[in-house]
Image (spheres, rainbow, N blue to C red):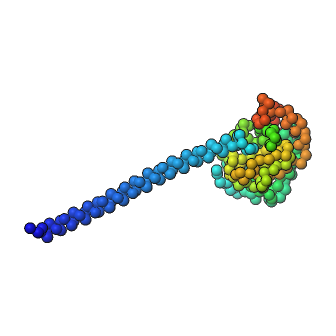
Amino acid sequence: MAPSKNTEREVREARDRLRRYNARQAVNAHRIKRRRRDNIIAVVGLVVIAALATTAQVLYFSGGPGTPEPTASATSTPEASLNVGEVPSPDVAEARTWTGTLTINDIPLAVSLDGAAAPQAVASVITDAANGYYDGSTCHRLVNTESLKTLQCGSVDGTGAIDTTYSFGPIENAPADGLYPTGTIALANGGTAYSQDHQFFIILGDSVLPTEGGGYTVIGTVTSGLDILQSTVADAGIVDGAEDGSPVVATTISGFTVQ
């Protein structure tokens, strides 16, 4: 016996309901799968970010001297005080040469800073100097190896730790060949272009540094007084006779003025 029209209609309606149900289930399953995928990607991203941050700190401490984008400031002169974490505009460097005196252990070092070649870095350093950031800070790291001879200064806590509230980039005016002549003043970084903060280092003897990651921003040179710093601090050596570590002679910046 053939099925009645009512029965056929009911069968078609049941099939339609089943197709709609299956379609909804497929959409729901896709959404769940996509949500799981997005969660996995997010977790992996957090792990990668944490790993990069750790690597940056390791490079800062144990690699060459010494992720964030720079925060622009409305500051137009180095005399103006900045809030914590606020990076001065490159315009502060005025695209000119700044001269001044960096006094370490009462040794006056005449310095010249190139605001045209490294405007962002020089703006940061001259603003820090004007705000008295460097006064009383230490030079925590002395290196004397075959390829690197340097004194590193300006750590936020005197141990070489990165200032987590302040960072900027990019790398500027870095030698393409990785050669840093005696007297060069450059900024430390954590292995990435935007991990520079207040720390700088002075090259005490012609040195070679890695170019991977962009190298190190050269901000200027010591034009006089370096020989006295060498004889009184560098020649006294490094704690425990190491090649890289704290200088035997406690080393402090007593003043930094620029004009």
| As drawn, 257 above or below 7 | above
State the residue at coordinates (66%, 45%): 56
Tell me where residue 114 appears, x and y as whole percent: 82, 55
- Extreme-top residue of the structure: 240
State the residue at coordinates (87%, 39%): 229
| As drawn, 154 above or below 88 | above
Q: Quadrant of residue 120?
A: bottom right
In front of the other: 69 or 173: 173
Tell me where residue 173 appears, x and y as whole percent: 78, 55
In the picture, measured across the screen, residue 257 lies left or right of residue 121, that is right
**Any part of residue 110 in sight:** yes
Quadrant occupied by the N terminus: bottom left
In front of the other: 206 or 253: 206
In front of the other: 106 or 214: 214
Total label count? Answer: 0
Q: Quadrant of residue 8?
A: bottom left
- Extreme-bottom residue of the structure: 5
State the residue at coordinates (54%, 47%): 46
- Extreme-left residue of the structure: 1
Tell me where residue 219 appears, x and y as whole percent: 80, 52
State the residue at coordinates (11%, 69%): 2
**Any part of residue 77 in sight:** no
In the picture, measured across the screen, residue 194 lies left or right of residue 173, that is left
Tell me where residue 97 appears, x and y as whole percent: 84, 56
In front of the other: 91 or 237: 237
